[in-house]
């Protein structure tokens, strides 16, 4: 497995995706403007053919007024392009809604790592300061040692669970990062090509090519978004099952009898007659 993505790496790709979504939402207005310019250009060409320069000026004014009546075929394609843009936004809505998920999963993973560190700190303290070997013997010392071993075993089990949860959550975060990274690359390409297509539409002469280019690139990115979303859903489902398996594996762990943390042996000691249970060595 590759190294888990850092919080900075995740934030970078998510910020870029957010900016791109905002830019996609601006595209319908740009499409409207391009077709408005195309309508004016078409009216100019038509008027100039019959009335010369003066007619071209009049045609431009006429085109600006009647742009919504501009050639039915082209008008239909304007709406088709805008519909495709909305379809893309609809497909990406779940990604917009889930923007905070990769960060949340990474933070949860780090929380499990921190918990493991705390358990390890407590365990090290117990190892360094809890031994009575060479100082005490007797029945109480045996009970203490047995309880100490159980506590140590339970801490090992807890640290193992922390590792499993940390890794599972980090994988989910990385899966989401892969999803957004792929989308960002495709949308970046879309915005460049869509901008070029819209510029062609505005010229009127190249409008049919621009319309075709716009619809084509939007269709491809929509297909990619669907494929990436499906892959993300399958991966998240797989990771969810992994977490369920981890939760099941925490049942009856070594050192945790009846799923309870082992109690200390202090209740077994008779503090009123320590001599009978403790023997200094």
Image (spheres, rainbow, N blue to C red):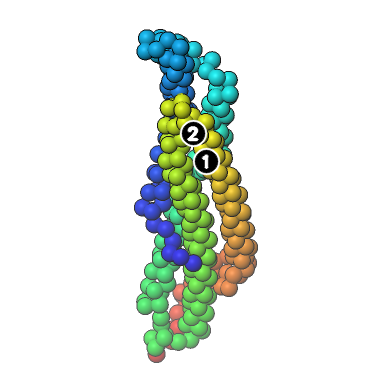
Residue to which mark 1 is pinned: 217
Q: Quadrant of the C terminus?
A: bottom left
Disc 2 secondary structure class: helix
Residue lying at 48% horizontally and 61% vertically, measured from the top left: 166
Residue 179 is situated, as x and y percent measured from the top left of the image, at 51, 51
Residue 110 vertical position relative to residue 228 in the rendered view, above or below = below
Q: Nearer the viewer, residue 143 or 56?
A: 56
Residue 15, numbered circle: none
Residue 164 is situated, as x and y percent measured from the top left of the image, at 52, 65
Q: Is residue 145 visible?
A: yes
Residue to which mark 2 is pinned: 210
Q: Nearer the viewer, residue 178 or 190?
A: 190
Residue 123 is situated, as x and y percent measured from the top left of the image, at 42, 72
Disc 1 secondary structure class: helix
Relative placement, left or right, of 86 versus 241 is: left
Q: Is residue 229 visible?
A: no
Is label 2 or label 1 in front?
A: 2
Q: Earlier in the sequence, mark 2 or mark 1?
A: 2
């Amino acid at each position: 497995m590759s190294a888990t993505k850092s919080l900075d790496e995740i934030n970078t790709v998510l910020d870029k995706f957010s900016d791109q979504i905002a830019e996609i939402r601006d595209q319908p207005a740009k499409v409207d403007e391009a077709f408005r310019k195309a309508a004016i250009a078409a009216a100019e060409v038509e008027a100039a053919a019959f009335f010369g320069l003066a007619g071209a000026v009049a045609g431009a004014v006429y085109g600006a007024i009647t742009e919504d009546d501009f050639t039915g075929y082209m008008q239909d394609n304007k709406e088709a392009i805008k519909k495709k843009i909305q379809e893309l936004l609809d497909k990406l809505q779940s990604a917009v809604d889930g923007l905070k998920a990769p960060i949340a999963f990474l933070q949860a993973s780090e929380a499990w790592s921190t918990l493991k560190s705390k358990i390890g700190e407590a365990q090290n303290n117990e190892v360094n300061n809890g031994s009575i070997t060479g100082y005490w013997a007797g029945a109480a010392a045996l009970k203490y040692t047995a309880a100490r071993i159980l506590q140590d075993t339970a801490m090992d089990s807890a640290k193992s669970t922390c590792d499993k949860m940390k890794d599972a959550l980090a994988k989910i975060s990385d899966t989401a990062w892969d999803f957004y990274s792929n989308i960002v690359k495709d949308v970046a390409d879309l915005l460049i090509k869509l901008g070029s297509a819209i510029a062609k539409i505005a010229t009127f002469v190249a409008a049919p090519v621009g319309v075709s280019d716009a619809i084509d690139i939007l269709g491809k990115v929509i297909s990619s978004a669907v494929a990436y979303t499906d892959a993300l859903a399958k991966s998240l489902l797989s990771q969810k099952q992994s977490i369920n398996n981890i939760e099941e594996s925490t049942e009856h762990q070594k050192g945790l009898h009846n799923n309870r943390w082992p109690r200390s042996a202090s209740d077994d000691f008779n503090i009123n007659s320590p001599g009978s249970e403790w023997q200094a060595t």
